[in-house]
Image: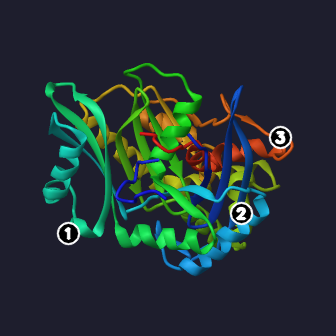
C-alpha cells in the first residue's frame, strides 16, 4: 500500500480509475513486447451529488458504483491508480536552493506556510517533484509541490477500499494527462504544449515543457454548463442534451447552425477562462512560445471548440490521441468505440500507464 504522504509515488502495472462528477472510467493498460496496449476500457455514469466539483460527498454510493464498474469490466487485479482534481488539490511551482530530497521534504513541512495555504501540515498529504536546475540560477532548483487535505484523500481511499480494491497510487488529473502525452507524442526538450481536459464540472490545464509540467490550473467549470444550457433552451432531458452537445440533431441547415451557435455561446465562459489561464501563463513565464494545444474530455468534441481556442490563443488546437503509440485489445474493445475513448479516456489511460517508482 502506498504511503500517502506521497502523492506522486507510484514495475507492476495497475488499473487506472478516473473518478469524475458524472461518470467513472476504467482503463487497464498492459505492457507487451510491442509496447503498451489498452486491454480494457469501461465507463459508467454516476448520479449527481456523489462527487461535487472534485469533492467526494457520498463515499458509500461511490463504493457501490466502483464495485459495479470493476465487476462489469472483468479486471482481475485489485490494485488501482486514481486521482484528485479541483480546488481541493494545490499544485505549485517553487524555486529552492539546491539540496537533497530529504532536506527538501523537511523544509517544505517546516515552512509550509510560505508555499501552501495550510496552517497545519499534520492535516495534509503532500509530495514534490524536482524539475531540475533553475534556468536563471544553477544554484537553485525548480520544484513542483502537490498537496491535499488528508481527510479529502482519505474519503476517496475509503470509497475505493469499500469496493474491495486497493488504491496503490493517488495521482492528480493534470499529471495523468501528462503521462498519457509522454507515452504517445514525440517532443523536443524546449517544446511547450498545453494539455486541456474539459470534464463535466472541472477543467484541467497543464502546460508541459519538454515532457515536464511547468504550470497547472484547475477551474470548476465544465461540460455540464453547456448541457444544462441546451436542456433549458430546447426543453429536453439532460441525457438528450448531453447527446445533442456532441452529436447534434436532425433538422434543416439553419436549425443545425442555430444549435452550433447556441453550443458555442454556452461554451464561451469555459473558453474565456482557458484564455485567461494561458494569458496568465504567458505573462508569468515571459511569453514563451506554445507549439500546440491538445484537448480531451467529453466536451472537447463539440463542434467549433478547437477552432475557437485556436483563434483566440493563436495556437493550433486539436483533440488528443492516446492511441498514437498505444494499441488496443480487439477482443475486449470495439474499434468503433475508439473515437469516443480518445477524448473521454485520456485521464484514465494516463492513470493506467502509471507504475510504482514513477516521477
In the picture of the structure, the residue carrying the numbered disc 2 is 70
Hey, which quadrant is residue 226 in on the image?
A: bottom right
Q: At 51% across and 39% down in the image, what residue appears?
A: 179
| Apparent side of residue 256 relative to residue 118 in the rendered image (left or right) | right
| Apparent side of residue 333 relative to residue 84 in the rendered image (left or right) | right
- Assign a secondary structure to mark 1: loop
Q: At 67% across and 43% down in the image, what residue appears?
A: 29
On-image quarter of the C terminus: top left
The label shown at residue 120 is 1
Mark 3 vs mark 1: give the one in front. 1
Mark 2 vs mark 3: give the one in front. 2
Q: Residues within 10 Å of mark 2 (few under 14, many from 20)?
A: many
Towards the viewer: 113 or 309: 113
Q: Indicate which disc, 2 or 1, sits on the residue closer to the N terminus.
A: 2
The label shown at residue 325 is none
Asked if residue 258 shows in the view, the reply is: no
Q: CA distance from mark 2 to mark 1?
A: 37 Å
Q: Position of residue 111 (x, y in %)?
A: 13, 56
Amino acid at each position: 500500500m502506498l504511503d500517502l504522504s506521497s502523492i506522486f509515488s507510484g514495475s507492476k502495472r495497475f488499473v487506472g480509475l478516473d473518478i469524475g462528477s458524472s461518470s467513472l472510467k476504467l482503463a487497464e493498460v498492459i505492457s507487451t513486447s510491442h509496447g503498451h496496449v489498452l486491454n480494457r476500457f469501461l465507463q459508467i455514469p454516476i448520479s449527481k451529488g456523489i462527487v461535487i466539483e472534485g469533492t467526494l460527498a457520498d463515499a458509500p454510493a461511490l463504493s457501490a458504483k466502483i464495485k459495479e464498474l470493476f465487476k462489469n469490466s472483468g479486471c482481475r487485479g485489485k490494485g488501482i491508480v486514481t486521482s484528485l482534481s479541483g480546488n481541493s488539490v494545490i499544485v505549485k511551482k517553487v524555486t529552492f536552493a539546491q539540496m537533497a530530497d530529504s532536506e527538501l521534504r523537511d523544509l517544505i513541512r517546516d515552512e509550509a506556510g510560505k508555499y501552501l495555504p495550510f496552517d497545519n501540515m499534520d492535516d495534509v498529504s503532500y509530495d514534490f517533484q524536482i524539475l531540475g536546475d533553475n534556468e536563471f540560477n544553477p544554484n537553485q532548483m525548480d520544484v513542483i509541490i502537490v498537496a491535499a487535505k488528508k481527510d479529502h484523500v482519505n474519503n476517496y481511499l475509503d470509497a475505493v477500499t469499500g469496493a474491495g480494491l486497493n488504491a496503490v497510487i493517488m495521482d492528480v488529473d493534470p499529471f495523468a494527462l501528462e503521462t498519457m502525452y509522454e507515452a504517445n507524442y514525440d517532443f523536443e526538450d524546449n517544446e511547450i504544449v498545453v494539455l486541456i481536459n474539459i470534464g463535466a464540472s472541472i477543467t484541467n490545464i497543464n502546460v508541459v515543457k519538454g515532457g515536464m509540467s511547468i504550470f497547472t490550473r484547475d477551474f470548476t467549470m465544465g461540460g455540464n454548463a453547456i448541457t444544462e444550457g441546451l436542456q433549458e433552451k430546447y426543453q429536453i432531458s439532460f441525457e438528450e442534451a448531453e447527446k445533442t452537445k456532441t452529436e447534434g440533431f436532425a433538422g434543416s441547415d439553419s436549425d443545425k447552425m442555430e444549435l452550433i451557435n447556441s453550443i458555442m455561446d454556452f461554451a464561451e465562459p469555459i473558453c474565456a477562462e482557458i484564455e485567461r489561464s494561458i494569458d496568465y501563463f504567458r505573462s508569468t513565464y515571459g511569453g514563451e512560445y506554445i507549439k500546440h494545444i491538445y484537448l480531451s474530455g467529453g466536451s472537447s468534441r463539440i463542434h467549433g471548440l478547437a477552432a475557437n481556442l485556436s483563434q483566440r490563443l493563436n495556437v493550433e488546437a486539436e483533440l488528443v490521441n492516446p492511441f498514437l503509440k498505444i494499441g488496443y485489445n480487439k477482443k475486449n474493445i470495439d474499434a468503433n468505440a475508439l473515437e469516443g475513448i480518445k477524448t473521454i479516456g485520456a485521464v484514465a489511460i494516463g492513470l493506467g500507464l502509471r507504475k510504482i517508482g514513477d516521477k
